[in-house]
Amino acid sequence: MHITKLLRRREIVLVALIVILSVATHALNPNFLSLENITDLLKSFTVLGIFSLGVVMVIVSGGFDVSFTAIAQVVQYAVVALFIHTGGGNIYFAVAVAIVFGTLLGLANGAIIHYYRMPAIIVTIATQSLYYGIMYVITQGQLIYDIPGFFWEFADARVGNFTGAHGGSFGLSLPTFLWFILGVILFFFLSYTKLGRSVYASGGNRISAERIGFNLARTTLFVYGAMGAIAAFASIVHVSLVQAVIPNSIVGSEMQVIAAVVLGGASVTGGRGTVLGTFLGVLVFAILSNSLTLLKISSYYYDVFTGLIILVSITANAIQVKRQKSQRIRVQIDEEHEAAKVGAAY
């Protein structure tokens, strides 16, 4: 029975899928499981991974957000343009400015959603168009290639440095390491703090959460503000890795992020989702993308896989929820039946 329950956990299924995909790809291309390829793989999906940490928190809270890519795009352009204009600064100051700006944009989403009782998906679709549209009107879509040098240094920084078989050096990218650290922080926040528990409670049943004393206004504002901050940090990582500001390079990737989060076990109806599951969901997408590249398969198949994964994951979540409801009803009927038997005996 315990083994059956264990196998039903989404994380176990994802680990098995990752192992199968990795072994199959490595059999076709031995370079896949090399440390150089693994570190490059993680680095290339760091931005998506950082985004996913904010999205899983929003979805667990019962909300939805498709504007985070627009927030990231606007923050990225504004911060880089600011530091080019001032001619100074460093990566720490850039991250701080970005987070403040992103938090304000995220808080705007949260305030509209909570105080005007509007559907989150409608609000964030609107603000995505609004934020992105304003940026394009102001910038006229101009690209920025001459970015400050500290962005380059941030992208090139490593945690550990190793020499490969062919003499090249490699190591875990600092942005990737920070993604892992942010994930650990979010895990402990959601698991062991009152505000973190209110995120789950809000997504499970908002009325019950409010009745037991959780402040839903604070929770909603925090979740969307944090999403904005995380999107802003991801935008700094993105510009550091790409070494340019391209106005349409981030918007449009939100479906990949949401798909990875849903694949990781987050329920689009709220109340369920984990940081570990989200990380594994991102890893599955990373392996799929890298496998297609190594095997020289058209990248268009990646979009096909993304759509299929969203459909399959949502269906699996719906089946699981339905099964859990049936079990609760069965238990309730059994308890009522037992109670009736005891009453009849007396």
Image (cartoon, rainbow, N blue to C red):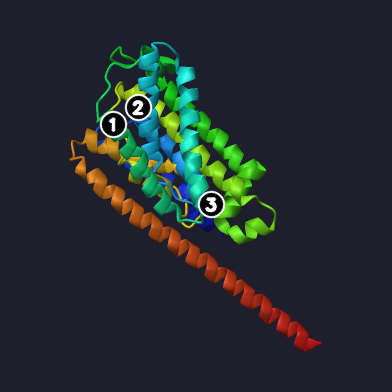
Disc 1 element: loop
Mark 3 surroundings: few (<14), some (14-19) or many (≥20) residues within 10 A: some
Task: Give me the residue at 43% from left, 24% from top.
Answer: 175
Check contact, mark 3 vs mark 1: CB within 8 A.
Answer: no
Q: Return the disc, 2 or 1, that comes first in the chain's sequence.
A: 2
Residue at 76% across / 88% down in the picture? 344
Label 2 crowd (10 A; few <14 / some 14-19 / many >=20): many
Q: Earlier in the sequence, mark 3 or mark 1?
A: 3
Asked if labels 1 and 2 touch by Cβ distance under 8 angstroms, the answer is yes
Quarter occupied by the C terminus = bottom right
Q: Label 3 near label 2: C-beta < 8 Å? A: no
**One can see residue 20 in this view:** no
What x and y, as percent, mark residue 153?
A: 39, 14
Q: Amino acid at mark 1?
A: Pro
Amino acid carrying label 3: it is His
Q: Is residue 120 visible?
A: yes
Tell me if mark 1 has few (under 14), some (14-19) or many (20+) residues whose alpha carbon lies within 10 angstroms of its own: many
The amino acid at mark 2 is Tyr
**Count of labels shown?**
3
Q: CA distance from mark 2 to mark 1?
A: 7 Å
Front residue (pair 169, 285): 285
The residue that label 3 is drawn on is 114
Q: Which residue is mark 1?
A: 247
Say left or right for 331 vs 279. Answer: right
Question: Which residue occupies 49% across, 49% down?
Answer: 112
Which circle marks residue 77 in the picture? Answer: 2
**Between 131 and 327, which is closer to the camera in this rendering?**
131
